[in-house]
Amino acid sequence: MAKMKIYGTPTSPPTRVARIAAMEFGHDAQLCQMAWRVTPDELYKLNPAGRVPALEHDGNTIYDSRVIWLYLEQLEDSRPSKSVRSLSGPDCWREANAATLCYELLMTGMVIRGMEEKPPITEHPYLARCAERRLILLQAIDDMASQGWLVEPATFGLADAVMICATDALVGREVINIYDYPHLEGIRMRYKTRKSIAETLGEYYPDQKGGVSAH
Ligand SMILES: N[C@@H](CCC(=O)N[C@@H](CS)C(=O)NCC(=O)O)C(=O)O
C-alpha cells in the first residue's frame, strides 16, 4: 500500500493537527509540502477549498484536520497509544465543544494573519472582531482547563492537539504571552515531550509574524 501522505506546510496549525493525528494513531505519514500561495492550482485539484491539510490514503483524499483525525481514529490498522482519548463515550460532547473552541481560536489567528498580508487591511472591523474573539476564547479555554478540562488530564485528545497547535502559532509569532493563560501553559508543558507534539513543531521566522497585539 502506498505511504500515507499529508499535504501542507510545517507551520500550518491544522496541518500539524493532522500530522499529530497520524503519529498518535501509529501511522508513518509523509509531509508533502504544498504552499497555497505558491502552487494554488495544484492544491485546488487536491482540495476544491484550496486549503491544507489534505490526507491521501488508500485511494481516499480527506480534507479538514478534524475529519482527518476522525478518519484515522476509525481506520482499522490504527494503533493509538493507551493515553489517546476517544471522541466517543460519555465525554464525547464535552470534548467536541472543547475542540470547537480550540478550532475557533486557531481560525482567529489565521484570519488576522490573512488580513494583514500585503496589501494590509488593518482598519477592517472584522480584524477587531477576531482579536476580540481571540481574547475571549483564550480566557474561556483557560477557565475550562482550570476546571479539569481537557476532559481528563491523564489523556490526550483532539482538543489538546488543536489547543497546542493554535497557541504554538500565536506564541511563535509573538502575538500572545502564554503566561497570561497559566492553565493552558500547564497543559502545553505537560505535553511538550510528547513525540507527536515535539516532532511536528514548525519554525516561525520573523517575516512570518502576523496578527495584532492581543493586549
Ligand atoms: N478547517 C480547516 C482549516 C484549514 C486552513 O484554513 N488551512 C490554511 C493554512 S494554515 C489554508 O489552507 N489557507 C489557505 C487559504 O486561506 O486560502 C482544517 O482544520 O483543516
Image (cartoon, rainbow, N blue to C red):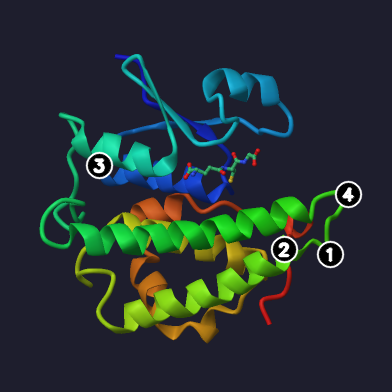
> Does the CB distance between marks 4 and 2 fall below 8 Å?
no
Report crowding for label 4: few under 14, some 14 to 19, many 20 or more residues within 10 A (C-alpha). Answer: few
**Element marked by disc 1:** loop
Mark 4 lies on residue: 119
Displayed quadrant of residue 21: top left
Amino acid type assigned to the residue bearing label 4 in the image: Pro
Real-space CA distance between mark 4 and mark 2, rounded to the nearest whole angstrom:
14 Å
The residue under the point 52% across, 51% down is 13
Above-or-below relation of 45 to 168: above
Side of 109 where 213 appears, left or right: right
Marking on residue 196: none
Mark 2 lies on residue: 127
**Element marked by disc 2:** helix
- The tag earlier along the polypeptide, 3 or 2, is 3
Amino acid type assigned to the residue bearing label 1 in the image: Glu
Marking on residue 25: 3
Give the mark toward the camera: 1 or 3.
1
- The tag earlier along the polypeptide, 1 or 3, is 3
The residue under the point 64% across, 65% down is 130
The residue under the point 27% across, 83% down is 147
Amino acid type assigned to the residue bearing label 2 in the image: Leu
Q: Is the residue indicated by label 1 positioned so its CB lies within 8 Å of ligand 1?
A: no
Real-space CA distance between mark 4 and mark 1, rounded to the nearest whole angstrom:
12 Å
**Element marked by disc 4:** loop
Mark 1 lies on residue: 123
